[in-house]
Image (cartoon, rainbow, N blue to C red):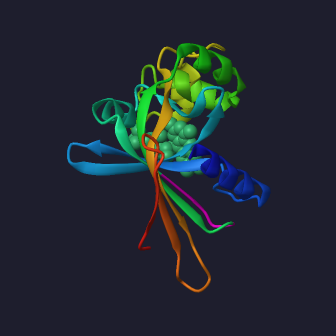
């Protein structure tokens, strides 16, 4: 099942699709769905996403570890809606990948230790000032975090020029593949 997803993603990459590396991940803030774009990473153990443990999404995803992940690659006209469960990112994966982050991303990760992502900045203190005061080091901060993604089922929608789109559902547990009314 994941094979089809990865093959489509490779086609999107080959077509230089600007969304080939991205996904939209949902969470629930109380009863309100929240969506955000994240980089979808190919890791040794499968797919994963990186984020700060101090962010709003981290808390929301702990409460709703089963959620939906969306991709759309316009270059190949394919949408995926993945029902996924999230598992904590192993520390060794963070330790391997964090050093490759751009310098500003590292600095922000350290800032989040004292000023969580999404917190309000006092109007007299600019982000530059906060970054200058943050005690950034060249090792991952405790809050550098993320999740490994396990696919429960997924829907693939292949747009067709004639409008008669191909919609299929794949179930990871049963291996079933069904065609749906688009
Ligand atoms: C192209 C793009 C890529 C992004 N990649 C990430 C990412 O990999 N990790 C991340 O935490 N935020 C990423 N963001 C920022 C998130 O969309 C979001 O604004 C931020 O994580 C705060 O989300 P939250 O308030 O729901 O916790 C990205 C945003 C864009 C536009």
Could you tell me which residue is drawn at 69 percent across and 66 percent down?
75
Q: Nearer the viewer, residue 127 or 144?
A: 144
Membership of 71 in magenta stretch: yes
Look at the image and tell me whether residue 123 can be seen: no
Look at the image and tell me whether residue 156 can be seen: yes
Q: Quadrant for residue 104, please give it.
A: top right
Membership of 114 in magenta stretch: no
| 161 left or right of 30 in image | right
On screen, 163 above or below 76?
below
The x, y position of residue 58, in whole percent, is 38, 31
Could you tell me which residue is drawn at 54 percent across and 25 percent down?
109
Q: Quadrant of the C terminus?
A: bottom left
Q: Quadrant for residue 161, please give it.
A: bottom right
The mark tally for this picture is 0
Point out the stretch of residues depicted in magenta: 70-75
Q: Main secondary structure of the magenta part?
A: strand
Residue projecting furthest to the right: 14
The x, y position of residue 115, in whole percent, is 42, 26
Residue projecting furthest to the left: 31
| 144 left or right of 119 in image | right
Could you tell me which residue is drawn at 69 percent across and 20 percent down?
99
Could you tell me which residue is drawn at 49 percent across and 67 percent down?
167
Q: Nearer the viewer, residue 80 or 97?
A: 80
The x, y position of residue 14, in whole percent, is 79, 56
| 132 left or right of 124 in image | right
Q: Nearer the viewer, residue 34 or 63?
A: 63
On screen, 109 above or below 83?
above
Q: Nearer the viewer, residue 103 or 169?
A: 169
């Amino acid at each position: 099942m994941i094979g089809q997803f990865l093959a489509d993603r490779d086609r999107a990459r080959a077509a230089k699709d600007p969304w080939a590396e991205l996904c939209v991940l949902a969470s629930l803030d109380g009863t309100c769905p929240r969506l955000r774009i994240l980089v979808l990473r190919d890791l040794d153990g499968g797919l994963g996403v990186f984020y700060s443990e101090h962010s709003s999404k981290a808390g929301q995803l702990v409460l709703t570890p089963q959620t939906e992940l969306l991709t759309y690659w316009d270059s190949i006209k394919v949408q995926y809606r993945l029902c996924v469960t999230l598992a904590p990112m192993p520390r060794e994966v963070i330790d391997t990948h964090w050093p490759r982050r751009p310098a500003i991303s590292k600095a922000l990760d350290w800032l989040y230790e004292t000023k969580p992502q999404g917190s309000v900045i006092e109007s007299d203190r600019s982000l530059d000032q906060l970054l200058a005061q943050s005690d950034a080091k060249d090792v991952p901060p405790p809050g550098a975090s993320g999740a490994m993604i396990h696919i429960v089922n997924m829907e693939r929608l292949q747009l067709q020029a004639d409008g008669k789109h191909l919609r299929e559902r794949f179930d990871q547990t049963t291996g079933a593949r069904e065609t749906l009314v688009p």
